Image (spheres, coloured by chain):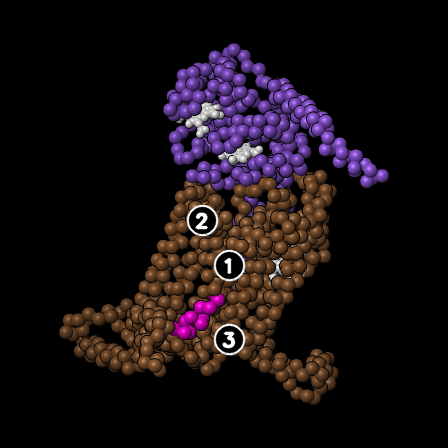
Amino acid sequence: MMQKLKRKLNGLRRSPRSVIAVLFAGLIVVGSGYTAVNASVSSERTVEYTKEDIEYGKKLFLSNCASCHGKNAEGTANGPSLIGVGAASVDFQVSTGRMPGAASGPQLQVKPVQFTEEEIHAMAAFVASLGAGPSVPDAAYLQANGDPTKGGELFRINCAMCHNAAGAGGALTEGKYAPSLDNSSPKIIYEAMVTGPQNMPVFNDANISPEEKNDIITYLVYLRESASVGGEELGGLGPVVEGLVSWFGLLGIIIAITIWLGAKSN
Amino acid sequence: MSSTSNQPKKNNFLAGTANYVDERLGVAGVLKEFGRKIFPDHWSFMLGEVALYSFLVLLLSGTFLTFFFDPSMTEVVYDGVYAPLKGAHMSIAYASSLDITFEVRGGLLMRQVHHWSALLFVAAAGLHMLRVFFTGAFRKPREMNWVVGFVLFVLGMGAGFTGYSLPDDLLSGNGLRIIDGMIKGIPFIGTWISSFLFGGEFPGTSIVPRLYSLHIMLIPALILVFLAIHLVMLVVHKHTHYSGAGKKDTNIVGYPLMPVYVAKAGGFFFIVFGVIMLISSFFTINPIWNYGGYDPSPVSAGTQPDWYIGWLDGALRLAPTGMEFMIGDFTVSMNILLPLAVSLIFLALVAVYPFIENWITGDKREHHVLDRPRNAPVRTAIGAAGVMFYAILWAGASTDLIATQFKMSLNQVLTAMQISLIVLPIVSFMVTKRICLSLQRKDREVAIHGRETGRIVRLPHGEYIEVHEPLNEYELYKLVDYKDYQPTLARPNAAGKITVRARIRASLSKFYFKDRVSPATQSEIEEARHHAEEIEQEVQKAIESAK
Ligand code: HEM
């Protein structure tokens, strides 16, 4: 019975007709999957911007950003073009304090935030009006109510090589680095993924769907908010710090005790 | 005190039992010998003991872990209490480590105790080794025991590495992957060894159970055997002591092992145990739940081994790139072979150092009085260079953390370390040697002229002098008690030829002993004392006449 079935399957597999059939089925699956993903990309709800927002944003932009990015955000020698970077990029850059940029070192630094939420909203509106790009994420994906297991897996596969498995951050080449994610809000995490700031790659919705982004956010928020089970975490930096503690903590304390006991007995 | 009489003491349970055992096994002789072994008192002599006691803690906590740990690599779906991994596919090894952590009562504490004591074990052994090196305690008759100790240190590294790989989390898998890569980089046999070790292609399903056998059976058993040899040799050789009046190469000064020392040691075990418990209760180590189960695709930034493997990782990282070349169809991966060779040579030099030094000095006498490090300037300087070399390789394992924590460029940190690896050991050799020589000169000065008192006196003829106070016998002894080796010359052998061997030996001897400060001799000291007395008389006379 099994043997017969196997032979039949083998025969099928070998015939050119079945090859075509399989190819065709594959195409349908891939094609419809792609359309579905594309649909989800374009169906993403966008925050509405009014004309006043854009006007106000333009004013702010001219006085704060145009020196580097140009009057029409077309880019200059000091800063890239912002046409098509989207509202998410502006929101990410300005609300983490990276923008307005200050020339320093190999990577733009996070600085104290210089604008209010309304101002950031307005500048995002202005930049969004210049060309389509990722928009500020829908609050539905920022609830940290997804699946932390899936999020953890996605994080380890897509992000840990730069940000470390526990999100503690890590070094890149030439003085660049991936920062620690301990203080990044869900919105910032989401926007970082869709805009790919500086040396971080873009993870668009075809790579990691909005739900999966929410899973990642859920995982990171869980890591941050759950109390450390094993005691003081030593910065999440792993074996190097553990080694230092074993020498200067453990062995150091024991030697200090021996010396103290020796001094006492004499 | 152990009783040695053959008459069983009545109404004394302990003595009765001891006698019962002795009459059947004849252990009293051994115990008596062991019990009368003299053990001197100095904190640096306790380092080996710290290692011993942390090993005991490892045995105890490790046994606890074996009750719950399952090394199988069969895949399961996690269904434990740790939410961010619920439903994840993982090996049974990782799942059982998570269960130990979150569900076994006291399990997390025991894991932390086991891991912290592992780090302490190797650290204490390492520092103990340095103490033995810098005080010259490895000299005859203790050369073999140095080698045994060295083997223990390497076994400790092996135990640690195999243990680190057991939980099968992301970090341990990353570590194994590096080892796999290193093995595969060895020409001809590399791929074969790798597939033998992993039972096929990395990671396979055999490596964790295999490492487990090594970790809980073979390596601890070897450590126990070598520890036993180490301790028996210690009893046979007796302990060394620091130099001082009455301390000679022919005697040992200290407390007898029984009962004073054993009581102290028992107490000390609990101190070590207590400190380990304290640190383990308050500080996380190896939070495997953060890393996730091993899966060959993800790699985490900041992947580091435990500290004692760090120097090997550092050697790999610091190796210059672009050195590989082809022989026929084979790529010779020098970026793996070079660090491998450097590490092995370094270890080999550490292992055989006592024999090298002995060959150079040609000293056949037994040594039980320790050297003060300054009195062996070149040895001390070699030690300092070695420590520096090791330390830079060690730091090399954390180039990425140094770069991020101190906001530097990873590439510059790497280059700086590559240069330091060559330059700093040489610098520390020279600086250490200079410091030793000048300390020796100062000792000589003090031995001859006594201690400065800060009392300035003007003599009748107008000269100002500072009055020096002579040292007492005890202080003096410590300053002059060392052997002053002279460089040996290459002598012709029986056939009248100067062999290459003899030449090498002579030039090494010159390297060791050409700059030296001989200890103050008795006549120098007496002459100086005589002179000092004359001055003192003159001073007294001057004071008299002034009155
Ligand atoms: C000789 C020195 C030893 C060293 C340096 C050592 C080191 C280690 C290390 C670093 C780990 C990883 C721990 C973790 O973070 O989970 C480990 C795990 C383990 N060790 Fe040892 N160990 C030693 C002896 C022993 C002995 C004697 C036993 C058993 C009798 C043992 C049993 C275990 C077990 C069962 C695990 C896995 C438990 C887990 O990962 O949760 N070890 N060891």
Numbered disc in front, either 1 or 2: 2
Q: Residues within 10 Å of mark 2 (few under 14, many from 20)?
A: few
The chain ID associated with circle 2 is B
Q: Estimate the spatial distance between the alpha carbons at disc 3 and disc 2, rounded to whole Å.
A: 52 Å
Q: Are marks 3 and 2 on the same chain?
A: yes
Q: Amino acid at mark 2?
A: Phe
Q: Is residue A201 left or right of residue B56?
A: left
Q: Is residue B496 left or right of residue B136?
A: left
Q: Is residue B37 above or below residue B206?
A: below
Q: Are discs 3 and 2 less than 8 Å apart at CB? A: no
Q: Amino acid at mark 3?
A: His
Q: Report which residue position mark 2 lands on.
A: B325
Q: Nearer the viewer, residue B330 or B367?
A: B330
The verdict on residue B82 being magenta is no
The chain ID associated with circle 1 is A
Numbered disc in front, either 3 or 2: 2
State which tag comes first along the sequence, 3 or 2.
3
Q: Report which residue position mark 3 lands on.
A: B239
Residue B518 x, y percent position in the rendering: 31, 74
Say which chain is brown: B
Q: Residues within 10 Å of mark 3 (few under 14, many from 20)?
A: many
Q: Is residue A260 left or right of residue B72?
A: left
Q: Are marks 1 and 2 on the same chain?
A: no
The part of the chain drawn in magenta is B350-360
Q: Nearer the viewer, residue B475 or B522?
A: B522
Disc 1 element: helix
Residue B259 x, y percent position in the rendering: 59, 77
Report the residue at 49% width, 56% height from top. B340
Say which chain is purple: A
Report the residue at 55% width, 67% height from top. B49
